[in-house]
Image (cartoon, rainbow, N blue to C red):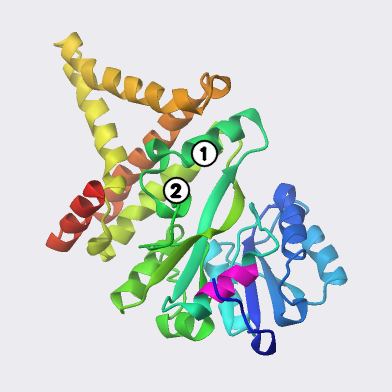
Amino acid sequence: MREVKEMNVPFVTVIMPVRNEEPYLAGCLDSLFATDYPIERLEMLVIDGNSTDRTREIAADYQQRYPCLRLLDNPQQLQVAALNIGIQQARGEIIMRMDAHTEYPSDYIRLCVTLLLASRADNVGGVLEAAGRTYFGKAAALAVTSPFGAGDAKYRTATREAWVDTIFPGVWRKEKLLALGGFSEAWEVNEDYELNCRLRAEGGKLLLSPVISCRYYVREEIGALARQYFRYGHWKVKTLVVHPDSLRWRQLAAPLLVLGLAVSALIAWWWPVLGMLLPALYLLANLVASAPKGWRYLPVLPLVFLTIHLGWGIGFLSGICKWGMPRLTIRSLRNAVKEVRS
């Protein structure tokens, strides 16, 4: 990967939406301020959505120590609103979205900027390495990086550089984000994927490099994990209704599982053996996917997989009830089949 020339170092703005991130914010900021990117060419915007814990206090403390950090207010509290506030306030020619649940290696900013400048890409990023702090969190981290848990999401599983359909968190030229109109505030969740749909529709390209990575801390409680994946599935439907060509097979697996389990429960009233077939097959697949991760997490990992699948699937079906059935197009079906084959 070609290095950024020292005489022409772009000014970079980091935008970080936060709300009640007390357990994670200090670790995230410590990792960012250990960057090997020239600090005088950085600004960091922490955009707070009325936190009720010590998040603002922590951010204010770092603001006193690091003049390049600015603490901004997000009265709407929604993450997507914070992102747009950051874009409007940014002084940098390059904008990097960052997540407070994440810690970044010292070369992260430099590698992202280098890749963006050296490629034809309009959005670049790397691989999310999931981590947990508790027993359940570590099991959840294993689950979300498993193909059984995450499907073929390249930003979790990629081992080689590739053009992809989405990237998280994301690195763009500011002029590109402004040309797109920023993030759509009609989305409370999945706003990153929706923006990438618009970007690709205009001929933009997204490049992922496994050389770039960051450590993302997953939800540490089963209820929080279930709510997170319910919201993912729920808002994915709105994205598919507006951008039907963005359909990927992994997005249908969980709702089909939920429907299959519901039908199996009805069948079991009359034909118990037949009704138990799908649940038994799912349980077997779940155990087969869990076993290679190690015996230590086997007692809880099947439950984590089930939580992810049911959360996403039920959320997806509730999204259909709210926004209607996504329209299947020839291109969307072709994309889904292509991904299965690859």
Q: Which residue is drawn at 87% across and 70% down?
A: 64
Compared with 217, 7 (above or below) is: below
**Hey, which residue is sitting farthest bottom in the picture?**
7
Q: Is residue 196 above or below residue 5?
A: above
Quadrant housing the N terminus: bottom right
| Mark 1 vs mark 2, CA separation in Å | 20 Å
**Left or right: 52 with respect to 317?**
right
Q: In this view, does 191 lie to the left or right of 243?
A: right
Nearest to N terminus: mark 1 or mark 2? 2
Crowding near the residue tagged with mark 1, few <14, some 14–19, many ≥20 C-alpha atoms within 10 Å? some
Residue at screen point 61% across, 37% down: 220
Residue 30 lies, in percent from the top left, at 77, 59
Q: Position of residue 59 (x, y in %)?
A: 78, 63
**Tag 1's secondary structure?**
helix
Instruction: Let me know if residue 195 appears in the view.
Output: no
Q: Is residue 131 above or below residue 215?
A: above
Which residue appears at 33% of the width and 25% of the height?
285
In which image quadrant can residue 97 be found?
bottom right
Residue 244 left/right relative to 2: left
Labelled disc at residue 178: none
Residue that badge 1 annotates? 225
Q: Residue 157 — which label?
A: 2
Q: Please state which of residues 160 and 56 is positioned toward the viewer in this rendering.
A: 160
Of circles 1 and 2, the one toward us is 2
Question: What segment is highlighted magenta in the picture?
Answer: 109-115
Does residue 193 appear anywhere in the picture?
Answer: yes
Residue visible at 36% across and 77% down? 204
- For label 2, the crowd category at 10 Å Cα-Cα, with few meaning under 14, some 14 to 19 and many 20 or more, is some
Predominant SS along the magenta part: helix
Q: Which amino acid does label 1 sit on?
A: Leu
